[in-house]
Image: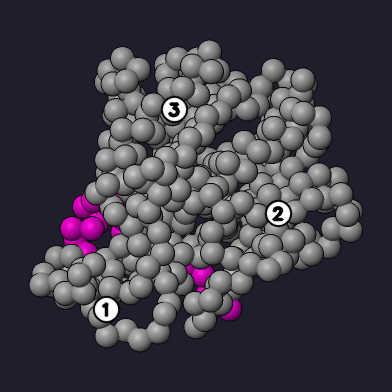
Amino acid sequence: MPNSIIISTGCCIPSEIISNTHFLGNEFFGSDGVRLEKPNPEIIEKLYKITGIQERRYVSNALTTTDIAYEASVQALEGIGRESLDYIIVAQNFGDVHCGNLRTDMVPTIASRVKHRLKIENPYTVAYDIPFGCPGWLQGMIMADYYIRSGDAQRVLVVGAEILSRVSDPHDVDCMIFADGAGATVLEASNEKAGILSHVTRTDTIDKAWMLRLGKSYHPDRKGDELFIKMDGHDIYRYALKTVPLVVKQALDKAGLMLGDVNKILMHQANAKMDEAILKRLFQLCGVEPVAEGVMPMIIDWAGNSSVATVPTLLDLLLKSKLEGHRLVSGDVAVFASVGAGMNINAMVYRLP
């Protein structure tokens, strides 16, 4: 049975840098429609202390999700025959949302649009999207691994792309968390004793399906029926802290590895404080103390939360030695983990060839 190895990566980091001062003029309201009493500098500082976000990246007005997905794909496919792709899987949740128009555009799929832009003629390069919340790119990698291990595919392009800046409510303090970006990875069948070793996915819906959802603006006087990202931040924090470490440990157990065998943990960049708490809980769960220094690289402080794009972007920067103090070399073990709307959680264990 072949193994799935990563042969190339790419990412699109938007050029527009949005600092926290950008939000000083926003009018913030609570979910009850009452304007927040605290002054904006205090609101912004509190959010920074919780999330660790100082800056985030936004796309220019002319760009769409397809554009940045395509750019990341071009990077990942450099030197690779595009016609050799068996699948193109694009993780995204809102389609192409054009500037000034909050209606989503998802027909045809973003994957089909990317295939068209790549000028791939092969009709057996199957292109489809996966809306799976923030863990979408990682779930795309897991699905690609199934295709490769079954013998159905030899080479798969997996992309995560999102423009959250256009679906975040400017009157909700959570709008300061969200960002834009895209990351892409090419997986290939290999006989090497490396690659994807294991993965675990779970979906919790009984009392958690609506913790992250779409809803109307918090501004009581805003007209129109536009929908924006809404989330129950405290509930998500508690859910992630309790559940993500369990899923990661399950993935390690399936791979027959211990936490001490792991060189890097690539966590979805949702919230710095939450990620650090998850890491601490994982080490406690595995009976390892103290938490290893430098095991979890972070980019949320300058890139924000770009949903499906955070982990593949982090991976691309890491493999290309663009993260100071962090690197991955042949034989290293990396764990990937994410949590998001669904509620979905997944984890994957990977050994570098």
Rendered position, 303 above or below 353: below
Tally of marks: 3
Q: Nearer the viewer, residue 201 or 111?
A: 201
Q: For the residues marked 3 and 2, what is the alpha-carbon distance in whole angstroms?
A: 27 Å
How many residues crowd around disc 1 within 10 Å: few (fewer than 14), some, or many (20 or more)? Answer: many
Rendered position, 173 above or below 86: below
Q: Quadrant of residue 316?
A: top right
Q: Tell me the kind of residue under disc 2.
A: Tyr
Q: Any mark on residue 251, and which?
A: none
Q: Name the residue under label 1.
A: 219
Q: Judge whether residue 47 is colored magenta.
A: yes
Q: Which of marks 3 and 1 is nearer the N terminus?
A: 1
The quadrant of the image that shows the N terminus is: top right
Q: For the residues marked 1 and 2, what is the alpha-carbon distance in whole angstroms?
A: 36 Å
Name, please, the residue furthest toward the front: 206
Report if residue 152 is visible in the image: yes
Q: Which type of secondary structure does the marked residue at label 2 adopt? A: strand
Q: Mark 3 points at which residue?
A: 248
Q: Which of 42 and 27 is in front in this view?
A: 27
Q: Residue at x 59, y 65 (%)?
A: 95
Q: Give the range drawn in magenta.
A: 44-62
Q: Quadrant of residue 191?
A: top right
Q: Which of marks 1 and 2 is nearer the N terminus?
A: 2
Q: Which type of secondary structure does the marked residue at label 3 adopt? A: helix
Q: Mark 2 points at which residue?
A: 128
Horizontal arrangement in the rendering, residue 220 relative to residue 303 (left or right)? left
